[in-house]
C-alpha cells in the first residue's frame, strides 16, 4: 500500500477535472513557474509541442515542453521541465518520484522523464533555427532546465545525464543564467 488513490477513485467530473487533472500532472506548478518567469520579464509558452515550434511532425513523440522561455537581452532559449514534489508526503515518496529522472531507457525502449526531457533538448538544439524563428530571435542557444518545487538531491549530485542542465528553483536557474 502506497497511500495513493487510483484514477478510478475519482468518479465525478469535478474530481477528475479539478483534482486528478491538476494534481497528478503538476499543471498548477507549471503555471506557477510560468508566472514567475513572466514576472522576471521572460516571454513563455506553456505546454507546447515541438511540432508547433518547428511547424512539422517530429520523427518520434517527444511530449510537450512544460515551458519554453526567452527574453530580450538574453541568448538563452530555456527548455524547461517542471517537477512538482509537493504531493510527496515524505522523503521516500520524493525519492520514488525522482527515480523517474535517471536519464535512462528501459529494455522495452521506454524513456524515463529525464530521458524524454534530454531528448527534447537535443532535438531543439538540432533544430535551433526553427526555435529561433518561433521565438522571433536571430540568435539564441537552447538551455536545458529542470525546475523542482523544492530542494532535491539532484541539485547537488554529479549525475552524468545532467551535464549541461540547470537544476533547481526558478530563482536559482535565473541566477545561474545571469552568471554565465
Image (spheres, rainbow, N blue to C red):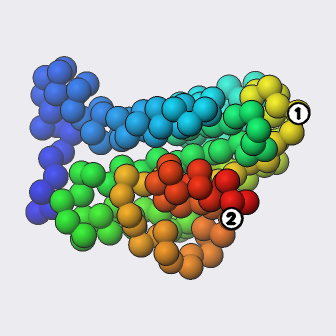
Pointer 2 or 1: first along the chain: 1
Q: Which element is circle 2 on?
A: loop
- Mark 2 touches mark 1? (CB < 8 Å): no
Q: Position of residue 48 (x, y in %)?
A: 58, 31
Furthest-bottom residue in this view: 158
Total of numbered circles in the picture? Answer: 2
Which quadrant of the figure has residue 163?
A: bottom right
Q: Distance between the residues labelled 2 and 1?
A: 23 Å
Q: Is 97 situated left or right of 117 in this image?
A: left
Q: How crowded is mark 2: few (under 14 residues within 10 Å), some or many (20 or more)?
A: few
Please state the horizontal and vertical placement of residue 113, each as a whole percent of the image.
49, 55
Q: Hey, which quadrant is residue 90 in on the image?
A: bottom left
- Residue 1 to residue 138: above or below: below
Identity of the residue drawn at 52% across and 57% down: 172
Quarter of the image with the N terminus is bottom left
Residue at x 60% of width, y 67% of height: 162
In the rendered structure, find residue 138 and report the number of the disc placed on it: 1
Viewer-closest of 131 and 8? 131
Query: Circle 1 — which element?
Result: loop
Q: Position of residue 34 (x, y in %)?
A: 49, 34
Q: Quadrant of the C terminus?
A: bottom right
Find disc 2 in the rendering and name its residue: 164
Q: Which percent across, then down, holds residue 4? A: 16, 52
Residue 96 visible in image = yes
**Residue 161 or 176: which is nearer the viewer?**
176
Q: Which residue is drawn at 62% across and 75% down?
A: 160
Amino acid at each position: 500500500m502506497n497511500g495513493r488513490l487510483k484514477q478510478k477513485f475519482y468518479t465525478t467530473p469535478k474530481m477528475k477535472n479539478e483534482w486528478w487533472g491538476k494534481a497528478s500532472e503538476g499543471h498548477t506548478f507549471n503555471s506557477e513557474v510560468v508566472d514567475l518567469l513572466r514576472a522576471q520579464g521572460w516571454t513563455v509558452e506553456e505546454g507546447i509541442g515541438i511540432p508547433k515550434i518547428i511547424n512539422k511532425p517530429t520523427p518520434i513523440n517527444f511530449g510537450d515542453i512544460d515551458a519554453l522561455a526567452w527574453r530580450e537581452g538574453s541568448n538563452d532559449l530555456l527548455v524547461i521541465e517542471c517537477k512538482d514534489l509537493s504531493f510527496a508526503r515524505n522523503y521516500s515518496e520524493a525519492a520514488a518520484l525522482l527515480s523517474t529522472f535517471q536519464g535512462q531507457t528501459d529494455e522495452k525502449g521506454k524513456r524515463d522523464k529525464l530521458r524524454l526531457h534530454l531528448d527534447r533538448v537535443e532535438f531543439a538544439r538540432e533544430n535551433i533555427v526553427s526555435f529561433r524563428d518561433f521565438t522571433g530571435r536571430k540568435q539564441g542557444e537552447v538551455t536545458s532546465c529542470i525546475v523542482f518545487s523544492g530542494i532535491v538531491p539532484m541539485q547537488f549530485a554529479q549525475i552524468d545525464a545532467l551535464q549541461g542542465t540547470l537544476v533547481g528553483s526558478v530563482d536559482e536557474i535565473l541566477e545561474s543564467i545571469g552568471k554565465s
